[in-house]
Image: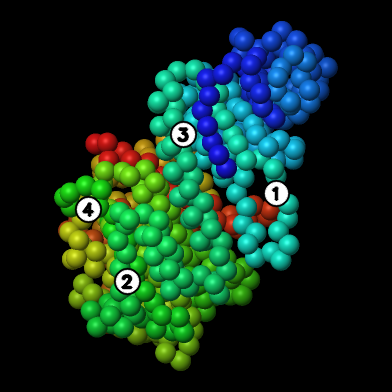
Amino acid sequence: MEYAISGKKVSALKTDCLILAVDEKATLLPADLPAGTSSQIRQLIKDRDFSGKKNQTLLVSQPTDLPAKRLLLVGTGDLPLAPGAFIKMLSSAVQALKASGSRNAAWLLNDTLVRDQDVLWQVREGTRAVDEALYRFDQYRSKPATGSPLTNFTFIGEGSKAALQEALRQGQAVAAGVTLCRDLGNQPPNQCYPAYLTEQARTLAKQYPALKVSVISEAQAEKMGMGAFCAVARGSEREGQIIIMEYKGAKGAPVALVGKAVTFDTGGISLKPGAGMDEMKYDMGGGASVFGAVKAVCELSLPIHLVAVVAAAENMPDGRASRPGDIVTSLSGQTVEILNTDAEGRLVLCDALTWVQQKHKPHTVIDIATLTGACVVALGSHAQAVYANDHELAKALLDAGDDSMDRGWPMPLWDDYQEQLDSPFADMANIGGPKAGSITAACFLSRFTKEVKWAHLDIAGTAWISAGKQKGATGRPVPMLTRYLMDLASS
Ligand code: BES
Ligand code: MN
Ligand code: ZN
């Protein structure tokens, strides 16, 4: 898709489809809309062909006195729109657009449309919304379905062209990161295994010379003392790998992202039930979001120093797999009794977290993981859980999520929960019992991040949609992470 900004007047705009947000009283119609079209719209409302209700769409061909070929009306409902409602409205418009024969389309910006957000926000988040609505993943179909012919999308608005262009550039960069994250997440697990992800990192490094990639093999991890990571990787025919992507757009200590990439989670010897197990291909969603954030950062050439680590392994039951009761020594020296081999995410993460601190001395570490089913129970699919040992960091992430419509919600890391991880035989157990499962998983990780500003995002509920037509990876939390890194770059 090509996106553009234009300051053209509606009355002079040649396009396959002009999209207009219209409320129930038609108060939003632009001042320069020719009289014929204006009264045509009012008539449609009067005749109840169009109501202006939330997300209703109506396609009008050959509008009376416009150079545009089609007019697409999309209802706003009550004004001003909540930011989330704006995104939904734009998605509805794109669905209607896809069903039309339009090859290009234009969206009229309006500064008063969205509560608390200006046109720059509308362009930035709108670009993403359009891109996400047009996303398809059909590389495994023998006959790809014919897509929509849409190739160009233009935002029409007055105001500083340079500022609008910059907002567009940011929106496109985040959209590219989201698309990469979704593509990786949707890959089937027989194609997407640790070495495949390494290959993807190398491909990125070819595209962006600022990016340096290195890999810790499973054998090296074993030698280095990553007993927790290897305890998970051991049960698979596919070699576990820790992938490191370093982007040095500034001097000084880096910020580190660490992603869980369990390319398939069978549960291991603590085998998961069969129903819905296919969804465990998305258990690399944290790692995929790290790839997405890296891509966006490279696209934007952000002036930051970033170290991105993807801990990639496959959790399989096998003759060499870990058993419940096994005790392993992590890279930090702390020992872990593996009571449940299905609590593998924290095991691959803890060694990656220790390693990145030892090797790169980051000022901040953020890990991202589809870590617990308990998180899905607690927050559903609207918010990711945000844990942090630092208030400012938590706030920065929550604010970034609010602004990019990729929201998080704060969760506690109180000491009171820590004792649930007590083990009679080792420094800690890898599970904390049935209560507060997302919190005790975060508490486990906190034991490996004591010396650094650290946050943990449990994205088990937000990284993918489980069922229905929309089943698949969502690209979250790439928008939150990218917004956070953009804010970091400008602070
Ligand atoms: N990858 C899962 C978490 C998960 C489950 C994400 C369902 C999304 C949907 C993780 O590795 C896991 O299996 N966690 C266990 C932990 C338990 C054994 C303490 C869980 O949540 O059941
Ligand atoms: Mn598991
Ligand atoms: Zn898992």
Where 132 falls versus 272 (above or below)?
A: above
Three-letter amino acid code of the residue under disc 4: Pro
| Identity of the residue drawn at 52% across and 61% down | 185
What is the three-letter code of the residue carrying label 1?
Gly
Q: CA distance from mark 1 to mark 3?
A: 24 Å
Q: Could you tell me how far apart the alpha carbons at marks 2 and 1 are, in whole angstroms?
A: 38 Å
Badge 4: residue crowd in 10 Å (few <14, some 14–19, many ≥20): many
- The numbered disc on residue 168 is 3
Front residue of this view, candidates 439 and 77? 77
Q: Amino acid at mark 2?
A: Val
Which residue is denoted by mark 1 in the rendering? 147
Is the distance from the Cβ of mark 1 to the nearest ligand 1 atom less than 8 Å? no
Q: Depth check: 443 or 187 in front?
A: 187
Label 3 crowd bin: few (<14), some (14–19), many (20+), radius 10 Å: many
Confirm or deny contact between disc 1 and disc 3 (CB under 8 A). no
From the viewer's perspective, is 72 left or right of 367?
A: right
**3 or 2: tag closer to the N-terminus:** 3
CA gap between label 4 and label 1 equals 42 Å
Between disc 4 and disc 2, whose residue precedes? Answer: 2
Which residue does the image show at 48% across and 88% down from the upper left?
A: 318
Tell me the distance, in whole angstroms, between the alpha carbons under discs 3 and 2. Answer: 34 Å
Whether the residue under disc 4 has CB within 8 Å of ligand 3: no
Classify residue 143 as left or right of residue 486: right
The residue where tag 2 is placed is 215
